[in-house]
Image (tube, grey):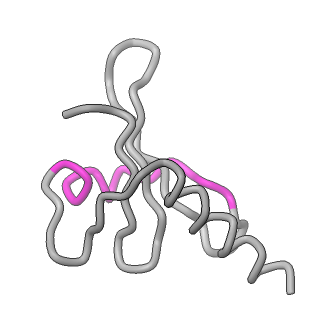
Amino acid sequence: MDLPRYCIVGARPVKAIRTPDGGMDVLAYDWKTGELRRDMTYLDRVITPDVEVDIVSEAEFERRVAELRAARAT
């Protein structure tokens, strides 16, 4: 699998990234803080996407995160 991988799971932005040691980490948007936090519970959904998972470009991922953060600020 090519990394990074950018996904929208339901409405939550989630990305999988390569770690310095060659492994993988999963970061998901945290509704409370607006930050991306490690959340390995999304690992299976990132590796084998289902109907609720959209694989998106980095630009689309960043746009969605920015929209969610802007909505939190209002």
Outermost residue on the right side: it is 74
The correct choice, above or below, for 24 with respect to 11 in the image is above
Instruction: Locate the N terminus by quadrant.
Output: top left
* Residue 19 placement (x, y as % from top left): 43, 23
Q: Residue at x 36, y 79 (%)?
A: 10
Nearer the observer, 14 or 30: 14
Look at the picture and state if 15 lies above or below 25.
Answer: below
Instruction: Give the residue displayed 30% in from the left and 58% down from the top.
Output: 55
From the viewer's perspective, tell me whether residue 71 is left or right of residue 12.
Answer: right
Magenta stretch: residue 59 in it?
no
> 23 or 7, which is in the foreground?
7
* Residue 32 vertical placement versus 21 (above, below): below
Q: Residue at x 57, y 52 (%)?
A: 37
Q: Position of residue 54 (x, y in %)?
A: 29, 67
Q: Farthest residue in the top direction?
A: 21
First to last magenta residue range: 35-47
Q: Going by the picture, which residue comes out furthest to the bottom?
A: 74
Toward the viewer: 8 or 33? 8
Q: Quadrant of residue 30?
A: bottom right
Residue 67, picture quadrant = bottom right
The percent position of residue 38, horizontal first and vertical second, equals 50, 48
Q: Report the side of 30 relative to 20 (left or right).
A: right
